[in-house]
Image: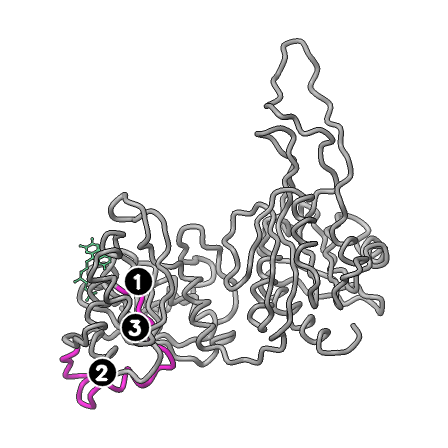
Amino acid sequence: MEEEVRLLLAGLGDVVPVQTGSTPAPTSRPVGSGSLSGRRVLLIIGGGIAAYKCLDLIRRLRERGARVRPILTKAAEEFVTPLAVGAIAADKVFTELFSREDEHDVGHIRLSREADLVVVAPATADLMAKMANGLANDLASAVLMATDKRVLIAPAMNPRMWDYPATKRNRATLEKDGIRFVGPSRGEMAESGESGTGRMAEPLEIVAEIENLLDHRPKPLAGKTIVMTSGPTHEAIDPVRYIANRSSGKQGHAIAAALVRLGATVRLVSGPVTIPDPEGVDVIHVESACEMRDAVEQLLPADAAVMVAAVADWRTANEAGEKIKKQPGKKAPALQMVENPDILAGVGHSTLRPRLVVGFAAETQDLLANARKKLDKKGADWIVANDVSHATGVMGGDRNAVRIVTRSGVEEWPDMSKDEVAERLASKIAEALQTVDV
Ligand SMILES: Cc1cc2nc3c(=O)[nH]c(=O)nc-3n(C[C@H](O)[C@H](O)[C@H](O)COP(=O)(O)O)c2cc1C
């Protein structure tokens, strides 16, 4: 029966993602490839409401190639079942310290050693207290004491528990002992209707921290600074209305994250988006094209600029100070527009021009001809051109098919996820910055 559930879930994996909150949909990266390929994560799940998020966490770790071996505390079994956890992890779930089956070779010591990293998520107030005080009266706490590997914890608890003096002392002790923390963040508590600090970090944040700790791939962009823009701009008409476009920021944010993974320091100027800031990126939030231009100018000089934002070409000539009212019998107001600054051209022709300037061209017609014209007009080295006609679903979607237009030719990339475009473009940028002339 358990095997059947496993097969079913494995088959459904890519079409029925386990989603939480505002977390974006997972990429379709196959299990066994990716940034955590071959890495072994021992995941200790504590008994808190946030335990349900572990199913998503396990899935995302496996998508990146990690092997996840779960341990559930007794309390955790009240929140998620070993069957569900085992099926998503595709591995045996451990729950008992005094297990005749697993302890013939002192299994708890073996478990703690056969991992590259131990992760506790959610880390309850109780588990943190045990860790800080050296208690080992169940499998989870015994493994935590016996491990010779690094330990990352994602605390989750009611804000009052988080601020309780004993928890504060335990936090300080654990930090001193070299335990790494991710979160908790501020927000609403699922179980109590209260809000404050105590929400477990989102699965993708935990994954990013795990990648940080375990990803030993080369960092060819270490020491390089890259300025980026992403998302749409909003051009105000009056205090409540604005002109916008359909850009979601997904592609730009994914590129920023991919550049950070290669070791770059990324400064991202983001227009208004509803997706989270990419992990490890300095983000400056702006609304309009003029604000975006000012922010970008402040960030130069840099080694490279990657301008992905869909900047509005025009803004209203006179933003109304008050909400424009409908007047019975009067015509609709005519909007006077003026041209916005061209941020890419500004960077491309700046005296502080970065060595590599990459622009994006979202077009609905004459894609290549328009992209080629932009190379010179904007002083860019590469234009990443994509067809954003409605039928392509690129704007706001998760996939993209781009062409890289340079002075020496055009590279046509197949349709792929925006994460894959980001990885590939980041590698190309790293390669270009390693050569003297781009
Ligand atoms: C509905 C419910 C929700 C709970 N949520 C949390 C929580 O989010 N964080 C926490 O530290 N404890 C929480 N607890 C208390 C823990 O379950 C309790 O302290 C338990 O002993 C923790 O065991 P463990 O640390 O071995 O997993 C909750 C208890 C209940 C009944």
Residue 85: image x %, image y %?
30, 67
Q: Residues within 10 Å of mark 3 (few under 14, many from 20)?
A: many
**Label 1 is placed on what type of residue?**
Pro
Residue highlighted by disc 1: 155
**Label 2 is placed on what type of residue?**
His
Residue at the image position 55 percent from the left and 71 percent from the top: 261
**Label 3 is placed on what type of residue?**
Pro
Q: Is residue 174 above or below residue 186?
A: below
Q: Are marks 2 and 3 in contact (CB under 8 Å)?
A: no
* Quadrant location of the C terminus in the rendered image: bottom right
Residue 70, label in figure = 3
* Residue bounds of the magenta highlight: 97-123
Residue at the image position 62 percent from the left and 28 percent from the top: 238
Q: Earlier in the sequence, mark 2 or mark 1?
A: 2
Decide if ligand 1 comes within 8 Å of the CB at mark 1: yes
Residue at the image position 74 percent from the left and 38 percent from the top: 314
Residue highlighted by disc 2: 108
Judging from the image, what secondary structure is the residue with disc 1 in?
A: strand
Mark nearest the camera among 2 and 1 is 1
As drawn, is 27 to the left or to the right of 232?
left
